[in-house]
Image (cartoon, rainbow, N blue to C red):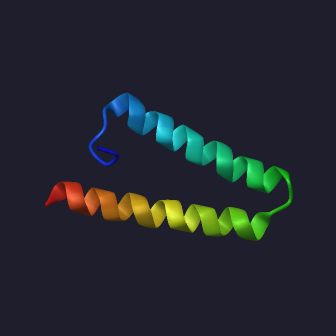
């Protein structure tokens, strides 16, 4: 499942999220980059909360 994947796949997802964020900044979409970052952080927090239960 997405939230319970291996450590390697978790690193891959983080790397992809960082790539998307940096790409948005590079193309001048600062507001979209900030929104994306906020969404990723929220999802990460929710997944960690879910796994910790």
> Is 17 left or right of 52, judged from the image as shown?
right
> Is 22 left or right of 1, judged from the image as shown?
right
> Vertical placement of 11 versus 33: above or below?
above
Image point 40% across, 58% down: which residue?
A: 44
For the C terminus, the quadrant is bottom left
> Vertical placement of 20 versus 44: above or below?
above
Residue that sits furthest to the left in the current view: 53
Q: Quadrant of residue 50?
A: bottom left
**Picture coordinates of residue 38 (x, y %)?**
55, 67
**Picture coordinates of residue 30 (x, y %)?**
77, 65
Residue that sits furthest to the top in the current view: 8
For the N terminus, the quadrant is top left
> Vertical placement of 12 versus 51: above or below?
above
> Is 36 left or right of 51, judged from the image as shown?
right
Image point 66% across, 48% down: which residue?
A: 20
> Vertical placement of 45 versus 23: above or below?
below
Residue that sits furthest to the right in the current view: 28
**Picture coordinates of residue 10 (x, y %)?**
40, 38
Image point 49% across, 34% down: which residue?
A: 12
Number of labels in the image equals 0
Image point 63% across, 69% down: which residue?
A: 35
Residue that sits furthest to the front in the current view: 1
> Is 2 left or right of 18, judged from the image as shown?
left
**Picture coordinates of residue 37 (x, y %)?**
59, 61
């Amino acid at each position: 499942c997405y939230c319970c994947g291996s450590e390697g796949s978790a690193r891959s997802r983080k790397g992809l999220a960082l790539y998307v964020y940096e790409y948005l900044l590079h193309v001048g979409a600062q507001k979209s980059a900030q929104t994306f970052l906020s969404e990723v952080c929220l999802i990460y927090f929710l997944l960690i909360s879910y796994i910790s239960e």
